[in-house]
Image (tube, coloured by chain):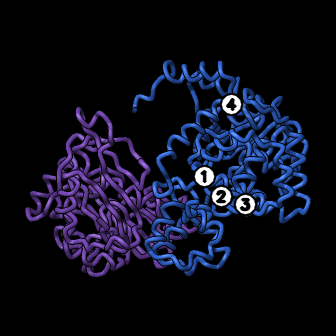
Amino acid sequence: MKPRPLLTQALIQPETLSGLSLKDWDLLIRQARHANLLGRLAYRLTECHLLSQVPEQARAHLESALGVAQRQTQAVQWEVNRIVQALEQLQAPIILLKGAAYIIQQLPTAQGRLFSDVDILVPKPQLEAIELALKIHGWITTHHDEYDQRYYRTWMHELPPMRHLTRETLLDVHHTILPETARYHPDPQQLLNAAMPVAGYGDRVKVLAPTDMLLHSATHLFHEGELNHGLRDLSDLDSLLRHFSAQDAAFWEKLIERAKQLDLTRPLYYALRYTTMILDTPVPPTTLRAAQVGAPSWITRQWMDALFRRAFQPPHPSCEDWLTKPALWMLFVRAHWLKMPPWLLIRHLFHKAFISPKDPNI
Amino acid sequence: MHIRIGSYTVHIRSALPSVSQGIHLLYADYPLADDDAFADFHVSVVQPNNLRRWIAPQVIFRFDHYVPFKPLPADQAYPLLEWGLNWCFSTQYHRHLVIHGAVVERNGRALILPAPPGSGKSTLCAALVARGWRLLSDELTLVTPDEIAVVPMCRPVSLKNESLQIIQEFESSVTMGPLAFDTSKGTVGHMRAPTDSVLRSQEHGLPAWIVFPKYEAGAVTQLNPHPKAGAFMQIAENTFNYSMLGLHGFETVTQLVDRCDCYAFKYSNLNEAIDIFNCLSEA
């Protein structure tokens, strides 16, 4: 097996970095920057009291990324505050997903992480009222093409992304966690029922229960078509698994049970397989065995290993081989395959290729 | 090649003759670092490998392998490199406050000229530099949040359209790099930074004046005191990473404005402008 890329090694064992030459640091910073993990690497080094030992030139970039991440944390908190205020008149619960949830709960996963948008999950019956309230408070839709609007509203699990007029922040409003057209149908009501209130935000602002948060994150990663940040997302899973299992001794058992209830054993299997394979996540052997219920056939597994091993390398030429690009392309096709039944996929691709107005700048 | 620009090292690769000519002409005085050095940014300007190279060749700027901008016609390769480097320093590095503005120094005190494009900031900066002011930067003023010092980012001065001729007439000894026509900013050329400024580009500058320049054809030269509150707002608006730095950004701009005398400046005659700033620096 090839030696681990510098970045992966650095995330697992930051203490091994002490012997790096300046040239190695140069490469590590490049790998981390393009993987969107510069902030997390800086945080790992801070956590281990190693940041001050990093050569000055490299440290400047790490400190810069830490500063950006801290500022983004603040911005996300403010954004959540605004969303809650905009939806104050409605009785609907607001479930914060992904990055916003990590930040509001102050999970270690949020430390040093960079965010691009806020995601919320709301009950489908109230979707219209929520969209209207958000519009009144300055969020407008970003996709003006009629086809795109229908694509989201009829087939997807979320409204077209909304952008705030003055702050220009992005908001994704979900009503379930996978597209309506996808193969798996986890029941969103079960997620809403198990969601937990966030301290200091009253009883309407909630986050998913730990098992559900992990399963949601895994489901997204393993259904995602664009894996440019594959390693970053896998590192999120690693961090969530380490954190939740340290908080609750029964977490592993609950996780397996919950995956069965929600029909998400396949994404959980992949999550555990690749976090342990790539990031040495300490998952107990009994859990790994129990997770086998979600394993695909032997042949599919060989395929997935070949594809995901490449997708979870740092996205930098130093970590790629001649199969990396085909692998990413095949995962993109696979994601669409899982997202829609074949007839719909053909129709969608046909529309995107021949009918959607082209960007005049291209 | 690894070029040292002040305290930074940039690794530049390009097989395009116009880029190497530009570098040869404009970066001749810069020290080189060896290939094992740490580079803050790895950039390249290359021709994309597609059929267009035979009909209407294009060039792209790469930050490592990432391509932040759309391709440009091949004859804009050199300015694309300079714009790309500006992009690296203004979006990928947030240890300092990055103000969109020129900064020059005389007698140990720095003059910051923040301004939106078209205000004549670069022309004024080029003229001051041609008359002996030290160039710290013509485009990005980097201010350290702790000491409120200006970190030099001394690179060629970008000039556009009429400014190119004005500066060449104003000072015939300046060296200009390759010209690019019909860019999104019109005709663009770069003026070589004075050797002395390049050699001193490790020395920080102490900000003393903030001047908001405005070129107006036929205007009488006027330097008027500018209220500090207004200066604060204008600096904040012209800072790439003001909100990115949060409280740090606010505090840095506050201290910077506190330490500087602030002026609004209207001009049409470069000689008169230079006289005024020379007087200011001797006061």
Q: Earlier in the sequence, mark 2 or mark 4?
A: 2
Displayed quadrant of residue A340: top right
Residue type at mark 4: give it: Lys
For mark 2, name the chain. A
The residue at which mark 4 appears reads as A339
Left or right: residue A352 versus residue B140 is: right
For mark 4, name the chain. A
Q: Earlier in the sequence, mark 3 or mark 1?
A: 3
Q: Which mark is residue A312?
A: 1
Colour-to-chain, blue = A
Relative to B216, say whether B97 is above or below.
below
The residue at which mark 2 appears reads as A278
Mark 2 neighbour density, 10 Å: few (under 14) some (14–19) many (20 or more) = many
Q: Residue at x 27, y 72 (%)?
A: B32
Looking at the image, do the residues carrying marks 2 and 4 touch, with CB atoms under 8 Å apart?
no
The residue at which mark 3 appears reads as A239
> Do marks 3 and 1 both belong to one polypeptide chain?
yes
